[in-house]
């Protein structure tokens, strides 16, 4: 793949541009930044020595494309050529394209695997649309095209899908939708068929949000253009896989029954025993002095713009600064709370590039001579108003994210610095509401609790508070705003109660409850690193499902004993060419190293049929779920299969790996796959390349035939892993993505449990072990039944590992066996769930 070098007089500009290119082109693209001058490169200028160093660092056999900003940068870059080895120099190409537009175009083209001439050509052409658009001055800019329903049928391909993730197209799923849609050369529109809103552009985060698209809403995705077919397939798959959200977050937030509020006149009792009641949003208990947190709005100048071009440039520079700050904040929160919770900041970055914000602001600057701050504020307020008009309260809360990002840009324009708030002693923070940015910037070491007047359990500040382990209550009466600073408060995040100047007896009770809560939380975290063993001594391995490096890192932190399912699809999807052997090797190796010696089960490619790849020609299928997919596809694409197996075996020489073949229906398929694997081993051995051999090899049991004939399959595999999601849909002939068949899609159906029992018995008779890697493995109601059936391993969402381990330790395997026998005798899934719920209640009691 061609690598890029960005040469700029400004370090901040180049780093921001790098972040923008990576949003469009992905993390695998090599990008070097040679920007600024001086000891820390913070001075304005360029350095030939630094440019030479960066070119050497990102050297690629496919070539290195260098883009530059100002004239002296070109001179420095040319001088740098004299400082690098001749063999590297011959691969360097200077590009006359513009730095920003050219960098983005080059990055996208390079990520597609194009040669350096094509990449340079795309970068050079990047300025052409801008030049044509600006010809004749800003007033010549055509107004944005209005999308009307009458256009929908013209030349469009379309698919209809149902949103099955928790909250539909809220910020993070919408961000992923926009990122994916933007990768394709196609015009893409989305309509909410349930409420008849749209169509809107699929490449605008805010436009998608205005659809009010919630869980179980049906949306239509339409596309036309060169890559329309590929775009539709990729977006459909993204929706059907719930945007990558794990099973643990799919359930809607539980309805919270609010106790009646204490009347305002009685809320703060004169004798110090007042209680305020709100919504519990983050568990925990705290006792500390009150601290009123106020976030003042940015100052907005009122004078008109004397130079629209200069104002537009000021706005773009401010957006660049904020983008860089958000990216740094995302990295910090990624380390503190994990990928899922930190993902909101990825959505914030996308908001900065959203045309629904940028285009109106630009029009106000050039057409009405607004200054940059006033134009941006007006644009932000318009989008916020669109959110606030939505019916769904969850989506209405996303207005806060737009306001949050908007205020950051306004502060950058005004030069205001949003400094971190530092406390000298423990406090309970009281605010009208906290934005995700404010929550991330607080001195969390001394904040023992958070109280807000607005917000809710699904607000991003509430999500971050839960992830950070800070007790929080929202929906409080404005009475609390009248309290003096440092008034003593008691807070119970379990019940949503706040005590004002609690009596000594109440303080003691709260302190005792806080101590018990902290001890239990610490114990849960500590014990998550220990094996999961039932009260009567049966050990169950608890491992993680992972789809990328961040998942693997979180799994290790939460006590996973390995990875039971590594989905390798992340390397193959949303791209136009297959990943190379080296790319796959490095990614799998890094994930294995993150587990620090614990085994990782690598599932070979599970795509095709319902999940096509644009670079593999396939015939249309009437029923893709029963078509050429998973192992069937791999066996029909020997080069693709061989490349992946080589990468896995090579990575296995560095870190412990196992291989698992998906969607096996017959013994013949396993034999063919193992023959492929043996051939690859022989090739690597002849080439003298280090690799793992022998290597444990297993299969996924997702098809009833594999479960029924497990006794015939057991001698030729080292383990079984049951994928309950597909096994359920194939057993009950009910597509799991069809909302009208949701009543059938329950993996605790006795028919599915009997198939699991058959697999376990056949495996154990042959001395092999059995894992479960479907969503069922992480459900509390399912865990005791699976243990009772004899399952040896549970592979689950990394975040659920501590709780599942604690649940296993609380039960006896003998009791679980009795429960599983009763479950097998049931006629309905609902009866099984009732039995299991009663069993769990006895453990809690």
Image (spheres, helix red, strand yellow):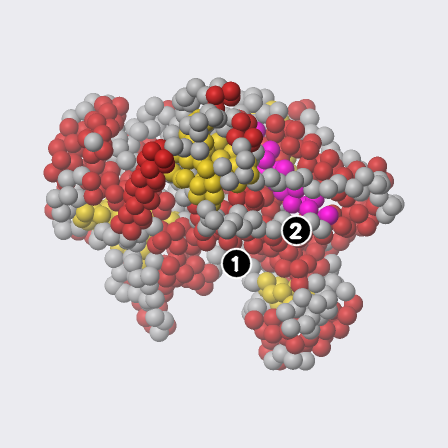
Quadrant in which the C terminus appears: top left
Q: Secondary structure at mark 2?
A: loop
Of labels 1 and 2, earlier in sequence is 1
Label 2: which residue? Answer: 417
Evaluate whether residue 140 shows in this view.
no
For the point 33% across and 28% down, the residue is 745
> What is the number of callouts on the image?
2
Q: Quadrant of residue 89?
A: bottom right
Q: Position of residue 246 (x, y in %)?
A: 40, 40
Q: Position of residue 763 (x, y in %)?
A: 17, 46
Q: Is residue 579 above or below residue 801?
A: below
Over which residues does the magenta segment extend? 394-414
Q: Is residue 831 above or below residue 172?
A: above
Residue situated in front as seen by the camera: 581 or 791: 791
Evaluate whether residue 273 shows in this view.
yes
Q: Quadrant of residue 730?
A: top left
Q: Main secondary structure of the magenta part?
A: helix
For the point 73% across and 66% down, the residue is 44
User: How far apart are labels 1 and 2 at the CA level?
Assistant: 34 Å
Residue situated in front as seen by the camera: 584 or 774: 774
For the point 73% across and 42% down, the residue is 299
Label 1: which residue? Answer: 28
For the point 41% across and 21% down, the residue is 259
Quadrant in which the N terminus appears: bottom right
Q: In the picture provided, is 357 more to the left or to the right than 821? A: right
Residue situated in front as seen by the camera: 539 or 216: 539
Residue 731 belongs to the span the image colors magenta: no
Q: Secondary structure at mark 1?
A: loop
Q: Position of residue 190 (x, y in %)?
A: 59, 31
Circles 1 and 2, Cβ within 8 Å, touching? The answer is no
Residue situated in front as seen by the camera: 437 or 604: 437
Residue 405 belongs to the span the image colors magenta: yes
């Amino acid at each position: 793949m061609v690598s890029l070098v960005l040469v700029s007089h400004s370090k901040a500009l180049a780093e921001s541009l790098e972040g923008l290119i990576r949003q469009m082109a992905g993390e695998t693209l090599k990008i070097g930044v040679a920007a600024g001058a001086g000891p820390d490169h913070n001075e304005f200028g360029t350095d030939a020595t630094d440019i030479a160093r960066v070119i050497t660092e990102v050297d690629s056999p496919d070539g290195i494309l260098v883009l530059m900003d100002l004239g002296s940068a070109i001179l420095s870059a040319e001088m740098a050529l004299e400082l690098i080895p001749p063999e590297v120099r011959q691969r360097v190409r200077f590009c006359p394209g513009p730095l920003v537009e050219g960098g983005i175009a080059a990055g996208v083209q390079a990520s597609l695997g194009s040669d350096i001439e094509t990449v340079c050509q795309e970068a050079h052409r990047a300025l052409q649309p801008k030049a044509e658009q600006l010809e004749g001055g800003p007033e010549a800019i055509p107004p944005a095209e209005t999308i009307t329903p009458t256009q929908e049928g013209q030349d469009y391909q379309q698919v209809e899908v149902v949103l099955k993730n928790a909250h539909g197209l809220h910020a993070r799923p919408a961000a992923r939708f926009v990122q994916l849609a933007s990768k394709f050369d196609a015009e893409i529109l989305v309509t909410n068929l349930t409420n008849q809103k749209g169509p809107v552009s699929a490449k605008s985060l805010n436009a998608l949000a205005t659809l009010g698209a919630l869980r179980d809403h049906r949306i239509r995705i339409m596309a036309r253009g060169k890559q329309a077919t590929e775009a539709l397939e990729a977006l459909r798959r993204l929706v059907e896989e719930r945007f990558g959200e794990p099973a643990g977050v799919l359930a809607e937030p539980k309805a919270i029954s609010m106790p009646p509020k204490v009347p305002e006149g009685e809320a703060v009792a004169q004798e110090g025993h007042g209680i305020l009641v709100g919504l519990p949003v983050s568990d925990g208990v705290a006792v500390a002095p009150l601290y009123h947190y106020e976030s003042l709005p940015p100052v907005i100048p009122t004078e008109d713009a004397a130079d629209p071009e200069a104002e537009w440039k000021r706005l773009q520079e401010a957006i660049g600064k904020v983008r860089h700050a958000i990216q740094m904040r995302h990295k910090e929160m990624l380390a503190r709370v994990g990928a899922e919770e930190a993902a909101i900041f990825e959505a914030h970055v996308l908001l900065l590039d959203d045309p629904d914000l940028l285009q109106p602001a630009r029009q106000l600057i050039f057409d009405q001579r607004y200054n940059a701050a006033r134009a941006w504020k007006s644009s932000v307020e318009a989008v916020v108003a669109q959110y606030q008009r939505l019916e769904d309260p969850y989506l209405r809360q996303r207005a806060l994210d737009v306001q949050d990002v908007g205020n950051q840009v306004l502060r950058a324009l005004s030069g205001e610095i949003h400094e971190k708030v530092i406390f000298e002693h423990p406090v309970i923070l009281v605010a009208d509401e906290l934005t995700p940015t404010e929550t991330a910037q607080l001195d969390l070491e001394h904040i023992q609790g958070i109280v807000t007047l607005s917000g809710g359990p699904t607000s991003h500040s509430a999500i971050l508070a839960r992830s950070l382990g800070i007790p929080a209550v929202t929906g409080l009466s404005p009475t609390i705003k009248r309290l003096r600073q440092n008034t003593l408060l008691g807070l119970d995040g379990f019940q949503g109660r706040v005590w004002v100047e609690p009596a000594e007896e109440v303080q003691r009770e709260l302190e005792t409850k806080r101590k018990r809560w902290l001890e239990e939380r610490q114990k849960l975290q500590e014990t998550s690193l220990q094996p999961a063993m039932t009260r009567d001594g049966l050990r169950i391995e608890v491992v993680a499902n992972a789809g990328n490096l961040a998942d693997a890192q979180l799994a290790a932190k939460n006590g996973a004993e390995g990875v039971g399912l590594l989905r390798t699809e992340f390397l193959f999807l949303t791209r136009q060419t297959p990943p190379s052997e080296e790319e796959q090797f490095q990614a799998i190796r890094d994930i294995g190293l993150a587990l620090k010696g614990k085994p990782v089960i690598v599932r070979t490619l599970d795509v095709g049929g319902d999940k096509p790849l644009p670079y593999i020609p396939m015939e249309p299928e009437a029923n893709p779920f029963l078509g050429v997919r998973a192992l069937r596809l791999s066996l029909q694409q020997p080069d693709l299969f061989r490349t992946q197996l080589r990468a896995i075996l090579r990575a296995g020489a560095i870190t412990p790996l196992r291989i698992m073949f998906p969607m096996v229906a017959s013994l013949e398929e396993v034999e063919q796959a193992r023959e492929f694997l043996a051939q690859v081993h022989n090739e690597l051995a002849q080439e003298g390349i280090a690799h793992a051999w022998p290597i444990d090899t297993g299969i996924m049991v997702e098809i009833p035939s594999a479960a029924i004939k497990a006794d015939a399959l057991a001698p030729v595999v080292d383990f079984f892993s049951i994928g309950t999601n597909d096994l359920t849909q194939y057993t009950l002939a009910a597509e799991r993505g069809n909302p009208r068949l949701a009543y059938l899609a329950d993996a605790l159906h006795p028919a599915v449990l009997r198939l699991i029992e058959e697999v376990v018995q056949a495996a154990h008779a042959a001395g092999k072990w059995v894992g479960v890697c479907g969503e069922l493995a992480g459900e509390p109601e399912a865990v005791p039944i699976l243990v009772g059936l004899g399952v040896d391993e549970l592979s689950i969402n990394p975040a659920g590992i501590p709780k599942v381990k604690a649940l296993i330790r609380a039960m006896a395997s003998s009791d679980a066996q009795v429960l599983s026998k009763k479950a097998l005798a049931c006629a309905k899934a609902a009866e099984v769930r009732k039995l299991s719920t009663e069993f769990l209640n006895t453990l809690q009691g």
